[in-house]
Image (cartoon, grey):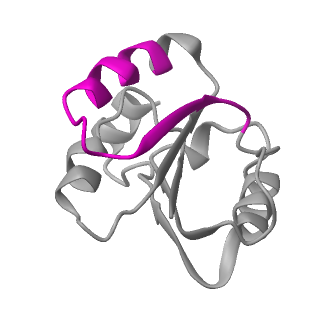
Amino acid sequence: RVLEVGAGTGLNVPYYAANTAVERLELVDASRGMLDALASKLAAYPSLKATAVLGDAARLPYADASFDTVVDTFCLCVFDDPVGVLKELRRVVAPSGRILLLENSRPENAFLGAYVD
């Protein structure tokens, strides 16, 4: 089982669909608009067993150790309480599971840094 927090419009959905090891996918986002876009993305992959959930990554509606893998791509930096979110991800991942984080950071180049700011 896989959980993605901050799933947004579902940019990662094609990767889950291509991975036959994904038996069940839960996609959580705090924005109804994002989930609406995600629903149409999921419609393109009818064989993917996925559920989109409106929710807060800091207070996930799942039991402890519910997932083999938890994914967050480019969202940790926008959560109000990133440490709280990390603790929550640790709570819902199985002891032998993995938490996969992909984040960006402010570029050291002054011009690019100003653009990101």
User: What residue is rendered at 68% in x and 39% in y?
Assistant: 79
User: What residue is rendered at 23% in x and 51% in y?
Assistant: 17
Q: Position of residue 32 (x, y in %)?
A: 57, 13
Q: Position of residue 110 (x, y in %)?
A: 35, 43
Quadrant in which residue 42 is drawn: top left
Q: Position of residue 88 (x, y in %)?
A: 78, 58
Residue 52 in the magenta stretch? The answer is yes
User: What residue is rendered at 39% in x and 46% in y?
Assistant: 49
Residue 97 in the magenta stretch? The answer is no
Quadrant in which residue 99 is drawn: bottom right
Position of 73 with respect to 112 (left or right) is right
Number of numbered discs visible in the structure rendering: 0
Position of 53 with respect to 115 (left or right) is right
Q: Position of residue 1 (x, y in %)?
A: 50, 64
Q: Nearer the viewer, residue 33 or 19?
A: 19
Q: What span is in magenta?
A: 35-56
Q: Nearer the viewer, residue 60 or 24?
A: 24
Quadrant in which residue 55 is drawn: top right
Position of 106 with respect to 109 (left or right) is right
Residue at the far bottom: name it. Answer: 96
Task: From this view, report whether residue 50 is shown above or below residue 64.
Answer: above
